[in-house]
């Protein structure tokens, strides 16, 4: 009779990587009709032009409909609301970011120590925000949805996974929320625009925070 292997130790089980998710609040149909796909692309192109010309504040459902020469109802049917439209604009950037930290090269992707990956994750997110801050602020979900949107869930799961690898004895669920709070677009806007802090200071602060959190003696 073959021997029964002992169960795999809990602390050594590999954490499943979170699935790459769409950032927008609405699920896309598996196969959009050609005309619907063209309409969506035209609406997003019109919205991108408005952002380039007037900033994110200039993007309203009415303005996008007028710029794309369609009825306002078409915009609402496709994106649900203004937040849905703005998050769809961020979708490409978010997918690239997710692909980088889930399967890209180290240190952001797999292959580097967890604390090093956490440092790279925050620096990359802050770098994104430096170029997209206005759009990210405008697309910030309402308080009741802020922690349940797909992009936020994927990022939180990733940070929690790295924390479990680095400091398995801590409450990684709560500490992950703490770290994610540092990267909030609202806080980044306050610190960089209202307080005049350089982004380099925020990046250095992130790395210091990660080092403190992932050092067992500090917990």
Image (spheres, rainbow, N blue to C red):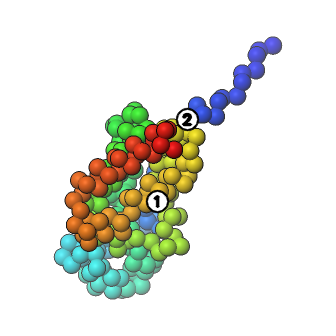
Residue at the image position 66 percent from the left and 29 percent from the top:
8
Residue 184 location in percent, x, y? Answer: 39, 63
Q: Are marks 1 and 2 in contact (CB under 8 Å)?
A: no
As helix, strand or loop, the secondary structure at mark 2 comes to loop
Q: Is residue 196 left or right of residue 139?
A: left
Q: Residue at x 47, y 75 (%)?
A: 142
- Residue at the far front: name it: 217
Residue count near mark 2 (Cα–Cα under 10 Å), binned few <14, some 14–19, many ≥20: few
Question: Few, some or many C-alpha atoms within 10 Å of disc 1 (few <14, some 14-19, many ≥20)?
Answer: some
On screen, 116 above or below 144? above
Task: Work out how far the residue at label 1 is from the one at label 2, CA to CA, in angstroms.
Answer: 22 Å
Image quadrant assignment for residue 77: bottom left
Task: Tell whether 20 sits left or right of 199.
Answer: right
Q: In the drawing, what numbered circle is on residue 138?
A: none
Q: Which mark is residue 14?
A: 2
Q: Residue drawn at (28%, 75%), measured in percent from left and top?
A: 56
Residue 185 at what x, y percent from top left? 35, 65
Disc 1 designates what residue? 152
Q: Is residue 170 above or below residue 112?
A: below
């Amino acid at each position: 009779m073959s021997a029964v292997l002992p169960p795999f130790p809990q602390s050594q089980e590999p954490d499943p990587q979170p699935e790459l998710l769409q950032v927008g609040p609405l699920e896309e149909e598996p196969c959009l009709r050609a005309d619907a796909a063209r309409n969506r692309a035209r609406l997003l192109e019109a919205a991108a032009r408005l952002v380039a010309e007037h900033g994110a504040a200039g993007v309203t459902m009415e303005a996008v409909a007028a710029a794309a020469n369609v009825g306002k109802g078409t915009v609402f049917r496709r994106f649900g609301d203004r937040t849905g439209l703005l998050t769809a604009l961020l979708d490409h950037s978010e997918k690239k970011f997710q692909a980088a930290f889930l399967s890209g090269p180290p240190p952001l992707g797999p292959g580097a120590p967890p604390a090093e990956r956490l440092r790279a994750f925050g620096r990359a997110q802050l770098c994104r925000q430096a170029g997209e801050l206005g759009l990210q602020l405008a697309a910030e979900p309402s308080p009741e949805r802020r922690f349940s949107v797909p992009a936020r869930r994927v990022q939180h799961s990733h940070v929690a996974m790295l924390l479990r690898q680095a400091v398995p004895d801590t409450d990684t669920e709560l500490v992950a929320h703490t770290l994610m709070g540092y990267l909030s677009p609202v806080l980044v806007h306050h610190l960089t625009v209202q307080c005049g802090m350089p982004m380099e200071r925020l990046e250095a602060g992130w790395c210091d925070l990660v080092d403190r959190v992932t050092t067992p003696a500090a917990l």
